[in-house]
Amino acid sequence: MSLKRRFYLLFVLVLMMGLVAPAVNGTVMAQDPKTLTLAFGAGDIPTIDPSTATDTTSVQVTLMTFFPLVRSNEENPSENFPGLAESWSLSEDGMVWTFKIRSNIPWVKWDGSAVVEVKDANGATMMVTAKDVEYGAKRLIDPRTASDYAYVPVDSLKLKGAGEFNSFAAPEGKDFTDPAVLEELNKLRDAVGIKAVDDTTLQVETTEKIGFALGIFGMWNWVALPQAVIEEFGDLWTEPGNAVSYGPFVVSEWKHDESMTLVKNPFWAGIENSPAPAIDSITFKFLDTSPAFSEYEAGTMDMVGVPLSELDRVKADPAMSKELFIGPNFCTYYYGFNVTKAPFDDARVRRAFSMAVDRQDIVDNVTKGGQIPARWFSRPGLAAAPTPEDSPELGIGFDVEGAKKELQAYLDEKGMTIDQLPPITLMMNQVEGHIKIGEAIQAMWKENLGVDVQLSAQEWGVFLDTLNQDPPQVWRLGWCLDYADADNFLKGVFRSTSGNNHTMWKNAEYDKIVDEAGAETDNAKRLEMYRQAEELLVKTDAAIIPIYWYTTVSVTKPNVVRTYSLSGHEYYEKWDKK
């Protein structure tokens, strides 16, 4: 999920430390509407375009308003249900997928007062077709889209022709509006291995057999998209009144930097693992943890994450302790280094900073939500991911003496003292939970290494732009699963070509390992490969500091009937209110 970005990111942290809250539901066509009010964290949602969404808040909305080919089980993400595709088959060689697209899903839009079906020039309801899915998938990898997630069909799915299409660049002095350039681009687009055979049949051809392909087809960006609307409105196509969609909910209002409201789609009849919504409307307020929690206590929020400063009180409170839920979440909290910026352009310094972090102390005394100290990146429980039981010595842990030796070796070689290190900044998005964790780690670096580190915080959208354009020396992110396989964490985030790799770190051996592991079908062999990759990532080169594996920590009002997702993305059409 991040970026979770992919990311999986803010919403992940939201769930983990209590930044998420059920929302106010006002239905489009209900006499007694059921409403929810939830919190989405401070700052506007970056985008609700499925092709460009990378963070968890953006992804959450796209999963509510569109619907992928396949739908995973929120309680067991490795289990897949039919989604927009009612069925599928795989060729004998494992490289051609054929999806049967449902024929009864209409395009809908918000007309200012209600959700209505979209009509064609003859007044007939326009239905979602395989051609719309082909357009959506090819738009994801189109170089003009510049999607951070294009690497998934290119590198992870090995979609035929995707790499050539995505990497195409206009010759110097020309752009994509040039007729000759556009002709060449369209040839490459047509050669991509995804074709609508007819309105209800979609074929996807890969160049290798990929065992976790169904998980990829369940991502938010494997959806049908409205080509005519996108071409008419450009970047504004997702605004209420312009947008058309087809999922369980429809965006009816977007007050940028303040809130977003979604209403149920009355034309969503319900399919496997996605019933017709019981909730009429959901309002997401863009609030930080403490203001959202105050509203929860005042009775104006239906579910929120719990601020770190309030968790002990909630646990001790007779009423709220019964509303508290702490459960597993398939996300990893980590700090990344920009390996091109001194002093973190040296692996010894990066290892020193990682070894100086007491992860157990963080989860025991700061987050307090049952999080698990992380020695590596990929979350245990994913297919082929290491676990503490099978890999007890893997990765990196708390070792003050080892940290001091690593830093001193660097200083001795450079002929420097600690006070001569360049100024060091740790940056995070403006969320109080992140800041508390940052302050604790800042104190550890001072006590264990004698190094002063400054903290800096930015609004969520600004922070994401900073990571994309000029990552600081050290920064925080979370990553939640897009599909339930270690490939999603290790290749998806830190392969040298990934748009989610803000470390600027490149290692050819690492790339080779994760590429070969993705193509391997024996999970025992894949596990060993991912162990090797993790060792390179977190210890040998120490491009990141894995800190902990998330839990969901939230309180929910007793009159809300809900489910809990392991992925960080909730299935709100399954929620109800008594």
Image: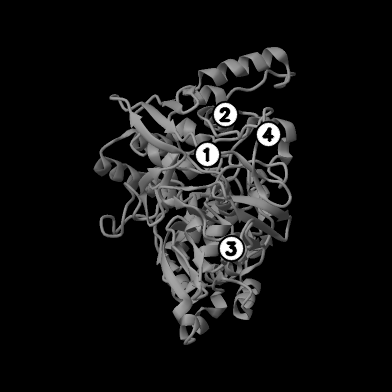
Residue 130 at least partly seen: yes
Specify which label sits upstream in the sequence, 4 or 3. Answer: 4
Which residue is found at the position 56% from the left and 58% from the top?
Answer: 11
Which residue is found at the position 68% from the left and 43% from the top?
Answer: 238
How is this picture coloured? one colour
Specify which label sits upstream in the sequence, 3 or 2. Answer: 2
Count residues near mark 4 (Cα–Cα under 10 Å), then give few for <14, some for 14-19, many for 20+: some
Q: Which disc number belongs to residue 105? A: 1
Picture coordinates of residue 168 (x, y %)? 60, 22
* Residue type at the position of mark 4: Ile
Can you identify the residue that label 3 sits on?
Answer: 418
Distance of label 1 from label 2 (alpha carbons)? 17 Å
Specify which label sits upstream in the sequence, 4 or 1. Answer: 1
Specify which label sits upstream in the sequence, 1 or 3. Answer: 1
Distance of label 3 from label 2 (alpha carbons)? 55 Å
* Residue type at the position of mark 1: Ile
Distance of label 4 from label 2 (alpha carbons)? 11 Å
Can you identify the residue that label 2 sits on?
Answer: 135
Mark 3 vs mark 2, foreground winner is: 2
Q: Secondary structure at mark 2?
A: helix
Can you identify the residue that label 4 sits on?
Answer: 230
Q: Are marks 1 and 3 in contact (CB under 8 Å)?
A: no
Mark 4 vs mark 3, foreground winner is: 4
In the picture, measured across the screen, residue 394 lies left or right of residue 126, that is: left
* Residue type at the position of mark 2: Tyr
Picture coordinates of residue 134 (x, y %)? 53, 28
Which residue is found at the position 68% from the left and 12% from the top?
Answer: 180
Distance of label 4 from label 1 (alpha carbons)? 19 Å
Task: Name the residue nearer the viewer: 33 or 382.
Answer: 33
Specify which label sits upstream in the sequence, 1 or 2. Answer: 1
Q: Quadrant of residue 234?
A: top right
